[in-house]
Image (cartoon, helix red, strand yellow):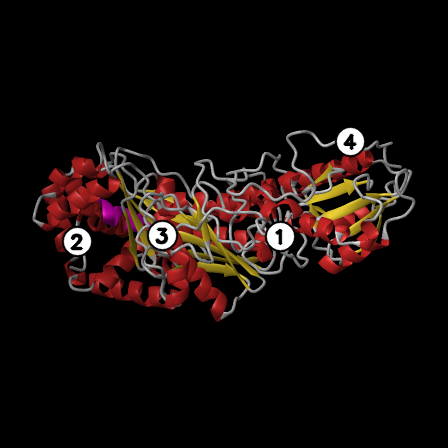
Amino acid sequence: MPESITPEPPEPSEPPAFSAPPASPVTPAAPAVPPTPPVPLQALLAREDLALRQIAGPADPSVVIHWAHTSEMADPYPYLLGGELLLTAGVHIPEAAGSGTYFDDYVARIVAAGGAALGFGVAPVHDTVPRALVAACEHYGLPLLEVPPQTTFSGVARAVWQLMAQARLAELRRVTEAQQSLASAAGRPDPVPSVLRRLARHLSGHAVLYGPDGTVLAAAGRETSDEIRAALAGLTVVVRPTGAPAPGAPADRTAATAAGGHAAGTTGADPAEGSPSTAGRSHPAEDLADGASAAPATGRQIPAPASPAAGPATGRPGANPATGHRTPAPPPAPSAAGTASGRPVSTPAAVSSPARPLPTSATDTVGSTHLAVYALGSGEGFVLGVATTRREPGDHTIASVAAVLLSLLTGEHHSGAGAARSSALVRLLLGTPPEQVAPLLGEGGWVVVHARPEAQLPDAVAASALGAALGSPLVDLARDVVRVLLPGGREPEPQPGWTLGVSAAVEPCEWLAADVQAARALARARATRTPLVRHGARPGLTDLVPRADAEAHARTLLAPLAGQPALAETLRNWLSLHGSWDRTAVALDVHRNTVRQRIARCAALLDADLDDPDVRMELWFALRHGRAGE
């Protein structure tokens, strides 16, 4: 039963019943409330120990509450932040309230303030819930709960906080599992598509990576309509540094979005979850669902214009942000008729205002689909877009983790690397020798790596991610092979999902030879199914023969193969793989019968018995020092 309550006189600082808010109030940047997760009202009603009973209002499972608050004020509007379960024993109700508009005005003020539900305690003041209050709650769509005499208000508040703790624990567990899953996906050979697939799965939606020019680089998840895809592409304009419209985005929607119309942007926090006045959201307290502060860390706020009929900061006429029920305009206070026009909000500002930094995220809603975009930290114009049909606690945190990982996968790997590479390219094009350009890119011995993914052909983003894993931005995607130039004597390590061939450490003047070494090492690695093969650089018998003599001998011995590079390369691989037909076929990407035919042709042209180990040794020596087939 509710605690014994005696009527308390209003404090001098509190306004009289139904007084209007100050004429020019200032909307706070962040409500002074803890970042509490939402609790479904149905979960509170399901608590048998409370024995609460809903007697009016919609039985909507989507109605959530963010805290419980007890008040016996006749006008609770100035003291509510939105999303509360307001508890009262009816001490404030005058004797003649049933015959006037008292209950209509009282409920209207609660709804206008964003209250989620009203709990009325039976006894000691009232034996039953007043019928006029039931009718008013039914009219305005405010859930009304009957609190039985044996249930105290403190017990209800404690139950709310227990449910919040359970929701927070479940949210943290979900976020942790998603973070581990996304980090694991970033280490796969196709990191960007893998991260998008995991993100789409965790959010049960659609995830897209947009390039600096607005084109779709990769996408995953549920299929969406053309309207949703166009709206999501248009929303990227808000956070893209260039501000160029995305391909396929409607011009009118793009313009409205860039001006801060439907979409709202924030700096440092998701607008859907980090600003109490953001347009295109279903609940002003969703900011708190993910544990983010209710306003960006910078204090920046880009609210949307709101009218009294729209409710606090929803931008949707007739919808209460906490419950979804119809929101009336707050009735004017008797003491200041015509001045109470609803909870004020700050005026909208264009997202692209030069006085404000560019927002890092933005949200919008198209029908029942929630849209969100995140500018990746690389600063090069890459944008992550997400479309979901529902919003759950932790969604913003999970999407932010994915944005950080994608920023690392798409951004520069070293400070100033872009400028250095540009300078090196210009000098090479203008005829500067490689050995003079190399100091701009790195110091020490150079290693060339040839890599090929095990499952599918590589793309530009996967190639960039491989370069990041190996520690070099000097990456070249050459058809089905990725070539990476590693400076500073770095030793490449095996990479999951990739097969690597590594050259010996060389000076810049020997880059071309190192490229050939890496290609042959990759062929051997693929043939032997080894994750990484390094070119052998040990001193051996060849060091005992002068280089000029070795090359002259090789040219003479391999002269019959001149002009037939395919035969020479097949013979080289076949000898290196100890005469294995199958492994040679894998290394060369040809049929094993093709290998047999080529080797037979080599034996005929060379007039040699290739089964003789001495012949094989001599040919191998010649192939290592000559340029057969040229």
Q: Nearer the viewer, residue 557 or 245?
A: 245
Residue 518 is one of the magenta-drawn residues? yes
Q: What's under tag 1, amino acid-wise?
A: Pro
Element marked by disc 3:
loop
Q: What's under tag 3, amino acid-wise?
A: Arg
Q: What's under tag 2, amino acid-wise?
A: Arg
Task: Indicate the position of residue 361 as horizontal and vertical percent values.
Answer: 44, 48
Nearest to the eye among marks 2 and 1: give it.
1
Which residue carries the number 3 mark? 240
Task: Indicate the position of residue 106 as horizontal and vertical percent values.
Answer: 73, 48
Nearest to the eye among marks 2 and 3: give it.
3
Quadrant in the rendering for residue 544: top left
Badge 4 local density, few (<14 within 10 Å), some, or many (20+)? few
Which residue carries the number 2 mark? 627
The mark nearer the N terminus, 2 or 1, is: 1
Which residue carries the number 1 mark? 321
Residue 136 is one of the magenta-drawn residues? no
